[in-house]
Structure formats: structure tokens, C-alpha cells
């Protein structure tokens, strides 16, 4: 009897061929996939599970990541139909684990790494006028800047079309492999009227950031990866 892994691989290959632009080839591949699934009692959930991949990025220096880091990982995960889990260990950088289909997690991890670095640098470089502000207030204003930066970048993600079937498959995979997970929540810093210029500065700084996502498995902009953050 054929090895079950080989069966699932063969079905997955047929499912990929069923997306062909050639209607005859696509129809034949889909029928073949259905026949194999019925013959060997393979469910769609099993096929989806075999297509799942994971990719990680370790970023930041704090056991409890700041709001802007968590929000950024969520923005990137949603942009590429992934789910992000955050693993934390004392004395180590938090690990942002992106889970999704095919190469999406690798692209999400790369995009997160680039955007994290850009936002971190922009936040640290944000000039606060000289005065008698204490360190706590300076950090608060930098967080206001970072949140405005994120708001602008997140608005670009709304242009991306999410695939609800992929999201559901990823959710099922995560629940099956990791069980119940806790939500890691950090509250954004409060803002007031005096933060108006800081907010504008953050939004302006984000204008130079662009997210690119391919419209098909083979479309790649120029010589860049399928999705990148760039100036």
C-alpha cells in the first residue's frame, strides 16, 4: 500500500495543478485529487495541515514586548494570512513565530524583521525638543510616535484581501499543535492634545514604507522577495 505521506503529497500536487489557467488541466487535476481523497480517506483538514509551515524572528530585548511590537507582528501576520505566536523565555529575545501556508510564514517573518528594524530605528531617532522632560515622558512620546507610525502602515494592509479558508485552516493547525494559547496584550500609551506633532511625525515617517504582496505564487516585484518592506 502506498505510504500515506506520499498519498497526501500527491493530492497536494493535484490541488496545486487544479489552480491552472488551463480549464481542462485544472478540472482533471481536481477530479484526481477528489478520487484520491475518497479512496484513501483523506480529509481537506489533513491536506491543509500538511501545507502548513512556520518561520520565526527573534526581536526586542524585553520579556514583555511593547505594544508597538505586538501590534506590528499582528499587522504583518494578517497581511499574509498567518497567525503569530510569541514565545518568551527569561534572558532571551521574544520569538515571533509566524504560521501559515506554503512560503507565507517565511515572507511574513522577513517582512516583520525589516519593519521592526525600521520602526525601532525611527522611534529611537525621533527627536524630542530639549527641555526638562524626564526619561519616562520621553519614552511615552516615542511610543506615541511609534503608534502613529503603525497606524499609517496598518492602513496599507487593508488593501490586501484575506483568504478566510486559509485563516481557518491555520487556526485549526495551531489549535491542534499548540492547544489553547493565551493572548498577550499590551495597552497603547494614552495620548493628549499636546501629542499632535508627535503623531504627525510618526505618520510622516511611515509614508516611506511600502508593503508588496504578490498576486499569485509566481509574481515577484523586480528582484525582491514576494513581500518586502522598502523605502
Image: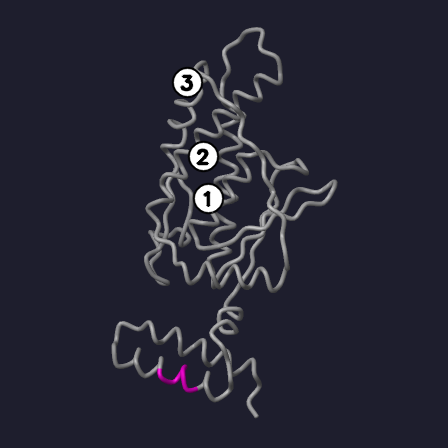
Instruction: Count residues near mark 3 (Cα–Cα under 10 Å), then give few for <14, some for 14-19, many for 20+.
Output: few
Instruction: Count residues near mark 2 (Cα–Cα under 10 Å), then give few for <14, some for 14-19, many for 20+.
Output: many
Label 2's element?
A: helix
Mark nearer the N terminus (3 vs 2): 2
Q: CA distance from mark 2 to mark 1?
A: 9 Å
Horizontal and vertical percent position of residue 111: 47, 46
Q: Nearer the viewer, residue 162 or 56?
A: 162
Judged left or right of residue 79, residue 142 is right
Report which residue position mark 1 lands on.
Answer: 75
Q: Is residue 66 magenta?
A: no
Q: Nearer the viewer, residue 102 or 174?
A: 174
Horizontal and vertical percent position of residue 167: 46, 58
Asked if the residues shown at circle 2 and circle 1 are in contact, with their CB atoms under 8 angstroms apart, the answer is: yes
Mark nearer the N terminus (2 vs 1): 1
Split into 4 quadrants, where in the image is the N terminus? bottom right
Judged left or right of residue 218, residue 101 is right
Horizontal and vertical percent position of residue 142: 52, 23
Taking the spot 47% from the left edge, 74% from the top edge, the residue there is 44
Q: How many marks?
A: 3
* Residue that sits furthest to the right in the current view: 90
Report which residue position mark 3 lands on.
Answer: 196
Report which residue position mark 2 lands on.
Answer: 150
* Residue that sits furthest to the top in the current view: 132
In the displayed structure, 1 sits above or below 107; it is: below
- Which secondary structure dominates the residues rendered in magenta? helix
Mark nearer the N terminus (1 vs 3): 1
Image: magenta residue range: 31-35
Amino acid at each position: 500500500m502506498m505510504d500515506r505521506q506520499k498519498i497526501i503529497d500527491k493530492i497536494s500536487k493535484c490541488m496545486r495543478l487544479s489552480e491552472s489557467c488551463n480549464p481542462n488541466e485544472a478540472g482533471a487535476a481536481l477530479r484526481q485529487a477528489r478520487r484520491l481523497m475518497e479512496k484513501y480517506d483523506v480529509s481537506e483538514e489533513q491536506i491543509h495541515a500538511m501545507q502548513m509551515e512556520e518561520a520565526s524572528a527573534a526581536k526586542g530585548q524585553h520579556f514583555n514586548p511593547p505594544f508597538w511590537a505586538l501590534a506590528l507582528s499582528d499587522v504583518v501576520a494578517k497581511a499574509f494570512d498567518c497567525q503569530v505566536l510569541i514565545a518568551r523565555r527569561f534572558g532571551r529575545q521574544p520569538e515571533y513565530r509566524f504560521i501559515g501556508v506554503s512560503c507565507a510564514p517565511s515572507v511574513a517573518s522577513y517582512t516583520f524583521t525589516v519593519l521592526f528594524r525600521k520602526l525601532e530605528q525611527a522611534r529611537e531617532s525621533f527627536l524630542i525638543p530639549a527641555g526638562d522632560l524626564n526619561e519616562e515622558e520621553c519614552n511615552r512620546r516615542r511610543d506615541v510616535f511609534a503608534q502613529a507610525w503603525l497606524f499609517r502602515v496598518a492602513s496599507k494592509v487593508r488593501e490586501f484581501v484575506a483568504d478566510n479558508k486559509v485563516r481557518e485552516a491555520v487556526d485549526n493547525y495551531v489549535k491542534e499543535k499548540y492547544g489553547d494559547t493565551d493572548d498577550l496584550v499590551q495597552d497603547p500609551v494614552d495620548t493628549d492634545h499636546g501629542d499632535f506633532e508627535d503623531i504627525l511625525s510618526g505618520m510622516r515617517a511611515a509614508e516611506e514604507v511600502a508593503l508588496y504582496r504578490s498576486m499569485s505564487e509566481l509574481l515577484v516585484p523586480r528582484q525582491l522577495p514576494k513581500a518586502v518592506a522598502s523605502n
